[in-house]
Amino acid sequence: KLLSIILVVMCSTFALGQDFDQVDSKHCDCENAMYTEDATFKPMQMPKGFGRKLEIKGHRIQNKYFPTREHNTLWVRFRFLTDTEFEFTLSPSVGSDDFDFTIWKVNGDNYCDSIRNGALPVRSNLARRNPENGSVTGLKKGAGQDFAKAGPNPTFSNSISVKAGEEYIMLLDAPYGAQGGFSTDFVYDRKAPEPVVIPEPIVVEKPT
């Protein structure tokens, strides 16, 4: 037990010593979500608090779609450039940190208002942290469920089949704050494959 405690302390100390991008607090609100078309992020530190607006609040802990309210949040919006299968893994640098997520498809210009008014997401995972596997979470093929409510549930939800031009927005929430940072690995096709050009056959004219 003493050795386990020492290892946990050493890992936490190492994680706290890493460099993480500090996220601008404006991204704690839906209307100012971080935007990306290639989902390339450096390891980052979770912001503290929920920004100027509380988009998510008043939900029962038994629901499988939303956190009960926003605690420490980051909003990220994605646009996909080709038809693909969207998977991602979020890995906390401190295995005891807890990260939940909810993902909506963006429909129209007033999607943040729709979210505030209770629009249902397409994916979520609110499962209890699992320090034994580093508390990793995310989307992957064949996970077995689209949504996972709070408690001892699987920490991965099913991947999403997306179409070119579609946009999605994700709420990341750290209900207890985060001692360390986190890294993300987004797995999907960034662009459509190059078209295969078949050369036309060369026609050799016979002399008359």
Image: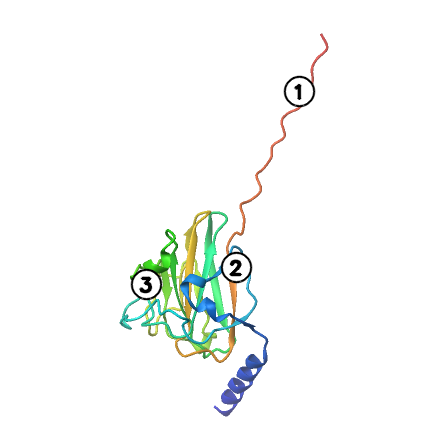
Q: Mark 1 or mark 3, which is nearer the start of the sequence?
A: 3
Rendering coords of residue 169 (x, y %): 42, 59
Q: Residues within 10 Å of mark 1 (few under 14, many from 20)?
A: few
Q: Secondary structure at mark 3?
A: helix
Q: Residue furthest bottom?
A: 2
Residue located at (47% from left, 74% from top): 47
Residue neighbourhood size for the residue with mark 3, other residues' Cα within 10 Å, grouped as few (<14), some (14–19), many (≥20): some
Specify whether residue 75 is in view. Answer: yes
Observer-side mark, 2 or 3, equals 3
Residue 206 locus on image (x, y percent): 70, 13
Report which quarter residue 138 is drawn in: bottom left
Vertical order, 167 against 17 (above or below): above
Q: Which residue is mark 1?
A: 203
Seen from the viewer's position, the closer of residues 137 and 76 is 76
The numbered mark at residue 91 is none
Residue 39 numbered tag: 2
Q: Amino acid at mark 1?
A: Val
Quadrant (top left/top right/bottom left/bottom right) for the C terminus: top right
Farthest residue toward the right? 207
The reply to whether discs 3 and 1 touch (Cβ–Cβ < 8 Å) is: no
Alpha carbon of mark 1 to alpha carbon of mark 2: how far? 48 Å
- Give the amino acid type for the residue marked by disc 3 in the picture: Arg
Crowd around label 2: few <14 · some 14–19 · many ≥20 (10 Å):
some
* Helix, strand or loop for disc 2: loop
- Amino acid type at circle 2 is Ala
Where residue 69 appears, x then y in whole percent?
33, 72
Residue wearing tag 3? 116
Find residue 102 and report its horizontal and vertical position in percent.
Answer: 38, 64
